[in-house]
Structures are given as structure tokens and as C-alpha cells.
Image (cartoon, rainbow, N blue to C red):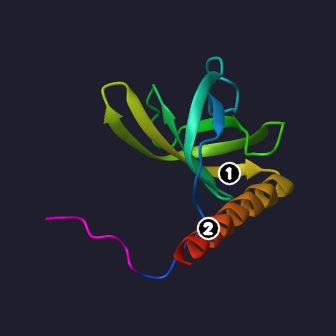
């Protein structure tokens, strides 16, 4: 049986955007200490003020806590957040999509992400309207 797309009201608090942002992360132990070194050169697939989904060469168990560093354009500095793995999808032999819900992030960083997502969505809509003319 084919899975149907959800057609009800949006339940997310923040709008989500497909975005290609640099992501670095490290797994944290239960006392929030790094387990290994940072994994670098991952890239996001989408982002919102509530979380991020990124590609990785390694899997993480659902519930794993990660410290994340990522950039959104046009910021020059990385945003740091702590997140919990809520979903892992195996794409092929050595590629995974890891979905994270933020459990700690600065309020001004949430605002920056949300503003970026809304600005890009507005630009997309404006472009579609121009193309219709």
C-alpha cells in the first residue's frame, strides 16, 4: 500500500526550508561530553528553527545527543546547537539522513534561522510569480 502525504494543517512551529548548509557534529555522552572528534563536511538537506536534517557517512541511533555547528548564508560564523536524533534514514550502503530536533540553541540563532527560511521562501514565491508573467 502506498504511503499518502499528510494533508492536514501544518503542525510544525517553524517553517522548514530545503537548504545546503555546512554541518559539523560530534556525538555526546549522557553527561554531554564529546565521544569522539567532530565529524566535518556534512551538509544539511533542510533546516528550520526547530531542527535540521543532514547527510552523514555514519549512522546514529535515534535518541543520540549531538553537538552541531552549522552555517546559514550569509552568516560567517557557525551556529552551535545541541540536538537529539529523532530519525535516521539509510539512503544507500554508506549514506544516511539524520534528522535532529534542537534541544538547546540560542534564541537569537533560532530567530536568524527562522528569518533566513522565511526570506528564502519569499524569494522563491516572488520568483514563481515573475515566471508566471
Mark-to-mark CA distance, 1 and 2: 34 Å
| Residue at left offset 62%, top offset 18% | 36
Evaluate if marks 1 and 2 touch, with contact meaning CB atoms under 8 Å apart.
no
Is residue 81 toward the left or the right of residue 29 in the image?
right
In the depicted view, which residue is nearer to us: 31 or 127?
127
Give the percent coordinates (x, y) of residue 35. Answer: 62, 21
Q: Residues within 10 Å of mark 2 (few under 14, many from 20)?
A: few
Give the percent coordinates (x, y) of residue 113. Answer: 74, 55
Identify the disc placed on residue 120.
none
* Residue 127, placed above or below residue 83: below
Could you tell me if residue 123 is visible in this image?
A: yes
| Residue at left offset 81%, top offset 52% | 109
Closer to the camera: disc 1 or disc 2?
2
The residue tagged with tag 2: helix, strand or loop? helix
Q: Earlier in the sequence, mark 1 or mark 2?
A: 1
Could you tell me if residue 14 is visible in this image?
A: no
* Residue 64, placed above or below residue 5: above
* Residue 38, placed above or below residue 89: above
Q: Quadrant of residue 116?
A: bottom right
The overriding secondary structure of the stretch rendered in magenta is loop
Residue extending farthest to the top is 37
Residue, disc 1: 103
The residue tagged with tag 1: helix, strand or loop? strand
| Residue at left offset 73%, top offset 64% | 119
Residue, disc 2: 127
Amino acid at each position: 500500500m502506498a504511503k499518502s502525504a499528510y494533508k492536514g494543517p501544518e503542525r510544525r512551529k517553524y517553517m522548514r526550508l530545503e537548504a545546503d548548509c555546512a554541518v559539523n557534529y560530534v556525538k555526546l555522552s549522557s553527561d554531554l561530553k564529546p565521544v569522539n572528534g567532530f565529524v566535518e563536511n556534512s551538509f544539511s538537506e533542510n533546516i528550520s528553527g526547530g531542527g535540521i536534517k543532514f547527510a552523514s557517512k555514519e549512522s546514529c541511533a535515534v535518541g543520540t545527543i549531538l553537538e552541531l555547528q552549522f552555517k546559514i548564508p550569509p552568516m560567517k560564523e557557525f551556529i552551535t546547537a545541541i540536538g537529539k536524533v529523532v530519525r535516521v534514514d539509510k539512503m544507500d550502503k554508506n549514506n544516511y539522513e539524520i534528522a535532529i530536533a534542537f534541544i538547546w540553541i540560542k534564541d537569537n540563532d533560532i530567530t536568524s534561522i527562522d528569518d533566513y527560511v522565511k526570506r528564502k521562501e519569499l524569494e522563491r514565491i516572488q520568483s514563481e510569480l515573475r515566471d508566471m508573467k
